[in-house]
Image: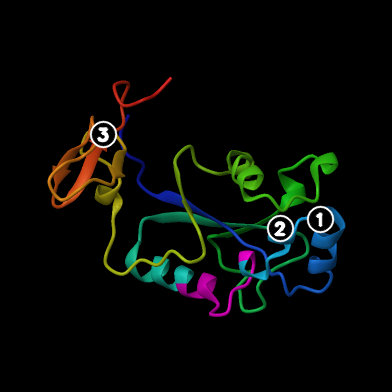
Amino acid sequence: MPAPAALDVVYTWVDMNWPGYLDECRRYHTQPAHLNPERYRDHYGLLRYSLRSLERYFPCVRNVYLLTARPQVPAWLRRDHPRLRLVHHDEVFEARHLPTFNSNTIESHLHLLPGLGDQFLYLNDDFLFGRDTGLADFYALDGRIKLMGHGSASRCRSGFTRRNGTCLALADSSTRRS
């Protein structure tokens, strides 16, 4: 399968300071760790900078999806941008499963985003591109997905080889786990 000509990029985002959001969290959470404001706080507006870095350094974007809780939308966001797809949780979740504050649950529903490509990048709002990036950074020439892993300076995990200082494997049937 050849690599796609462009990739969709997906972000999940919520603003804990949105009126009523913290009260909604308190209605469903009883453990203090679940109400830790650091889980949702964004002192530096990192989503804005992540989007800027994406636009500057990764030109291979088909659409950018922002999945958030209704009615939240960053005030500065250009909602009319032709490649932006703003999607609220209630568009991909059954009503009986809402509200949800669990990032694992939210991430398990990304494939339900309307029009999302079969292959996409999922980025957190604190992920920044710092140099030119292209599809060759994610795909081998034959279209297989590059898997990058961690390893010591001299060794990589089984199934990975070191290339340019990174442990790298190509996704195919031999790298899948049952």
Quarter of the image for residue 65 reads: bottom right
Element type at marker 2? helix
**Relative to 69, does residue 105 appear above or below in the rendering?**
above
User: Which of the labelled discs sits on residue 30, or is there none?
Assistant: 1
For image coordinates 31% across by 38% down, the residue present is: 145
Vertical side of 132 occupied by 166: above or below = above
Kindly identify the amino acid type of the residue bearing the numbered disc 1: Thr
> Callout 3 environment at 10 Å: few (<14), some (14 to 19), or many (20+)?
many
* Magenta-span inclusion, residue 45: yes
Residue located beneath label 3 in the image: 170
Q: Which residue is mark 2?
A: 34
Which residues lie in the magenta part? 39-49
Q: Are marks 1 and 2 in contact (CB under 8 Å)?
A: yes
Residue 36's spot in the image, x, y percent?
A: 68, 66
Q: Quadrant of the C terminus?
A: top left
Where disc 3 sits, the SS reads strand
The residue at the point 13 percent across, 51 percent down is 164
Please state which of residues 9 and 165 is positioned toward the viewer in this rendering: 165
> Badges 3 and 2: C-beta atoms under 8 Å apart?
no
* Nearest to N terminus: mark 3 or mark 2: 2
Locate residue 101, reporting x and y percent: 72, 53
Residue 34 left/right relative to 29 = left
The answer to whether the residue labelled 3 contacts the one labelled 1, judged by CB atoms less than 8 Å apart, is no
